[in-house]
Amino acid sequence: MAGVGFRKWAQALTKSKGTGISALLSGCRAASGGSKGSLPGSYPTTPEEKAAAAKKYNIRVEDYEPYPDKGEGFGDYPKLPDRSQHERDPWYKWDHPDLRRNWGEPMHWDFDMYIRNRVDTSPSPVDWISMCKQLFGFIGFMLFMFYIGEKFPSYQPVAPKQYPYNNLYLEKGGDPEKQPEEVKNYGI
Amino acid sequence: MHPTSLMMTTSLMTIFLLLAYPVLTTLSPAPRAADWALTQVKAAVKLAFFVSLLPLFLFMNEGVEAIITSWNWMNTLTFDVNLSLKFDHYSIIFVPIALYVTWSILEFAAWYMHADPFMNRFFKYLLVFLIAMVVLVTANNMFQLFIGWEGVGIMSFLLIGWWYGRADANTAALQAVVYNRVGDIGLILAMAWMATNLNSWEMQQMFVTAKNFDLTLPLLGLIVAATGKSAQFGLHPWLPSAMEGPTPVSALLHSSTMVVAGIFLLIRMSPLIENNPAALTLCLCLGALTTLFTATCALTQNDIKKIVAFSTSSQLGLMMVTIGLNQPQLAFLHICTHAFFKAMLFLCSGSIIHSLNDEQDIRKMGGMHHLTPVTSSCLTIGSLALTGTPFLAGFFSKDPIIEALNTSHLNAWALTLTLLATSFTAVYSLRVVFFVSMGHPRFNTFSPINENNPMVVNPIKRLAVGSIIAGLLITSNVIPLKTPVMSMPPLLKLAALTVTILGLMVALELASLTNKQLKTTPTLAPHHFSNMLGFFPPIIHRFTPKLNLVLGQTIANQLIDQTWLEKAGPKALVSSNIPLITTTSNAQQGMIKTYLALFLLTLTFAALLVSY
């Protein structure tokens, strides 16, 4: 009696099309979710494999270009141009307007870097080298000038007061017979 | 207890309770009243302002300051963290000013944000920010200051990203948080150094025990913290980007209160800084560079809020210069006067923007003096105060700073840069007034453009009154702690005025040229440098995240596998052994008979040698 129940349970477990442990036991997959054909595969070598890969990723065959096979593990994932979402037309009616992306579009390998909150690859009015030269030249110039400014500081000159009559020699009680020494604090 | 100190303590506690009460009422599930923002929040801030006047008058009359330690929070055998509030000269003057400015901004925000469905939440955020700011300025220990510091940072993030559906606002909020975080590294470094070396976070103990230490490292940390929070050069791009937030946010956080927190930290720590010439020189040079760089960027901007934002950044650089001159009280005076006219400039900008149907480009404004005379007059008053026009608020703080610069022994280039930035201030201020108020309108006719709503005009008028008399009031009632240099040649005394007038004349000349120019946008290289903010944001915001993210991906995807499988594992075994194997097997050519013959020959010779 219990054995019959156990057998039925074991059959249900192995023949079910669920996920988790039953899928582990039976090897079956549920009908929803990605099929095996939609997962990334190995690097395509023949034109037929290239065409199949292009169809899988929803790109035209002429646009499809896989990453070079250098052992980095990209497989047949397409190499899309390194353009961030900033460069896409802000006025076009995208399916996801905030992401500037349509449904089913292939995602760039580094899509998380190219979202609108992160790296912007749009062309700048001034080219990159010129920008770097101007900014770092400015910073370098400022640092150099600060160094010069430390060498030649600005200050109000201060000197002891110079009195007339030989620095008031006689008034200060100096000997009238002796020749006073010249005290010159500053010249005019 | 002495009645004066009792009154001080009571007032401070009352202020905290008044500000916290509206926030606590939001914890209940019952919905707020329709006019909760005006009747509860604005009223709370207004009442707190009048309450805070009591300690202010006590201080002005008797010079009394209070330090209140009210709660032992975390106390170990050797280290105490208490809830201790310092109501000294700086916080007694700053709290009423912050509350006055916030009161005006809240009244304005009730008009500006009236169409927003979440206005109550907006006001709650502003109130939480204000509480965090008051906690920061009244903190007597570093832990409490840090709580306030982080609190204002988080509220800044929430408020900049108020319109979170806009990706640019999200990016700006993230920028603010990340740049502030970089500054926080410095603050935490300083706090850690103080905890380990001075064994306390209480300011009084720190100032006494720090006398025998070399304080360069913690001071560098504090300067980095101020660079992040107060948008000094290097960590400055977040401040202009923060203009993505609503104008009341820009007026409160990013002009009057939050951005001065970094300078306020340095002012609080001034007893530590004043004996360290390296730190002082660093503050001076960094402040001078900031003030000139941001003033240069402000010259060619076309968004009215961006111009005012860069103006704020430039004045913050000037405050940093003042700290570098070892004049913390002058820097504090500038914080106070700056709060008035900068908040007013922002409110005037907000009023004009809303009137022109959310137009922020000054090239599409013009002739506003005929349409909104009070707003445009207050814009002019604010600009004049900013440039240091004699006897307005800015004059009483800016002029002593320039005089102190001219009469001190300091880096000559820092002096040059600051004077140049002062004249640039006049240039961009005139540019704003010229494009916005003067001339003829360059926009389509809108209706209604008027100033009939008192909720717009009264705050601006209140702040205008502050912009005119605040400088005089504070300087006549507060005794300076350092003797200012009184005697100097007339040229130095009038230096600030001279460079400002020179700047104004240059700006007037440029303004008259503007009417005759043919191209809409200039194509000169210096214009590009200024307009694109010195190319700092494009370079840093493209290069650094890309480097970090690509590096992260490469390490995660390839480097670990490559290391363990190729460089240190099976393939390494192969690649290290193959040369050995090749050498060995190449050496052996397979000539077995020759090897045997040689072997036997060698054996024979050896046997012969042994036997003989």
Image (cartoon, grey):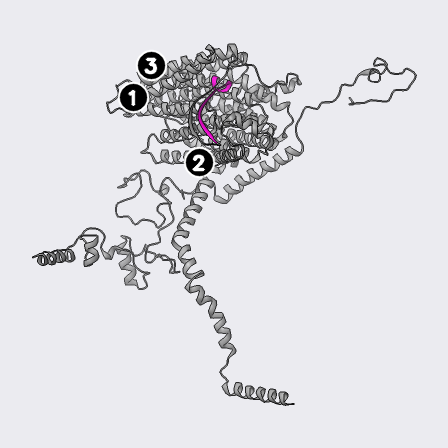
Verify whether residue B81 appears in magenta. yes
Residue linked to disc 3:
B453
User: Alpha-carbon distance for marks 3 and 2?
Assistant: 41 Å
- Label located before the other in sequence (3 or 2): 2
Cβ atoms at labels 3 and 1 below 8 Å apart: no
The answer to which of B193 and B159 lies nearer the viewer is: B193
Q: Is residue B531 visible?
A: yes
Residue linked to disc 2:
B181
Mark 2: few/some/many CA within 10 Å (<14, 14-19, 20+): some
Magenta segment: B79-92
Q: Secondary structure at mark 1?
A: helix
Residue A5 lies, in percent from the top left, at 9, 56
- Label located before the other in sequence (3 or 1): 1
The answer to which of B20 and B239 lies nearer the viewer is: B20
User: Alpha-carbon distance for marks 2 and 1?
Assistant: 31 Å
Q: Is residue B489 left or right of residue B326?
A: right
Residue linked to disc 1:
B25
Residue A40 lies, in percent from the top left, at 29, 56
The answer to whether tags 3 and 2 share a subunit is yes
Q: Secondary structure at mark 3?
A: loop
Q: Amino acid at mark 2?
A: Arg
Q: What residue is drawn where x is 39% and y is 26%? A: B360
Chain at tag 3: B
Residue B148 is marked as none
The answer to which of B345 and B360 lies nearer the viewer is: B345
